[in-house]
Image: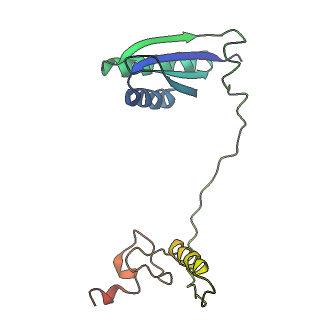
Amino acid sequence: MKQSLGLLEVSGLALAISCADVMAKAASITLLGMEKTNGSGWTVIKVAGDVASVQSAIITGANFAQTRNGLVAQKVIARPAEGILASAPTRAAIPETPPVSITTTEKPVQSIEHEQPLREETSAASESAAIQLVTCNLCLDPACPRQKGEPRSLCIHSGQRGE
């Protein structure tokens, strides 16, 4: 299936980003990029995809921009010539990556015992390593099992406040 090219020109970068968000949510398109044009702070949003998706996205983005008095121009090129989309990546040229699943497994935090550093540089490196392992933002103790955002009562130093 041949790709289609959609161009939407709006006034201002903030409106362009909002339009691109609305367009991406409205249809299955690929955002090719945004370019600032010469003068007046206009920005062009370039999208690609199948013809119906691009037409739907451009109409949605144009209506969104028009309600905010920022629409400058819109254009959908149904099946552009070979040289038009050659420099822009198409959906077929973008490598498919498997979806990344994020799982949260809580592991107990082990305390780090520092040995006497030989040089001052190693001391700074070990302190930065200890800071990175701190999970409790109340006591800043690496041995505390409390995670940021959990109740204060889970902190091992909760009864020692103000001492």
Q: Quadrant of the C terminus?
A: bottom left
Work out whether residue 6 or residue 117 is closer to the camera in this orientation and state it: 117
Work out whether residue 158 or residue 162 is closer to the camera in this orientation and state it: 162
> Residue 91 occupies which quadrant of the picture?
top right
The answer to whether residue 25 of the structure is visible from this angle is yes
The answer to whether residue 28 of the structure is visible from this angle is no
**94 over 145 or under it: above or below:** above
Q: Give coordinates of residue 153: x percent, y percent.
A: 35, 81
Work out whether residue 118 or residue 128 is closer to the camera in this orientation and state it: 118
> Residue 46 occupies which quadrant of the picture?
top right
Q: Give coordinates of residue 63: x percent, y percent.
A: 38, 18
Q: Give coordinates of residue 64: x percent, y percent.
A: 37, 22
> Residue 136 occupies which quadrant of the picture?
bottom left
Residue at (61% x, 86% y) in the render? 117
Q: Residue furthest front?
A: 119
Residue at (38% x, 31% y) in the render? 14
Residue at (39% x, 13% y) in the render? 72
Left/right placement of residue 58 relative to residue 65 reads: right
Q: Residue furthest left?
A: 162
Total of numbered circles in the picture? 0
Q: Give coordinates of residue 111: x percent, y percent.
A: 55, 85
Left/right placement of residue 25 relative to residue 81 reads: left
**120 over 17 or under it: above or below:** below
Q: Quadrant of the N terminus?
A: top right
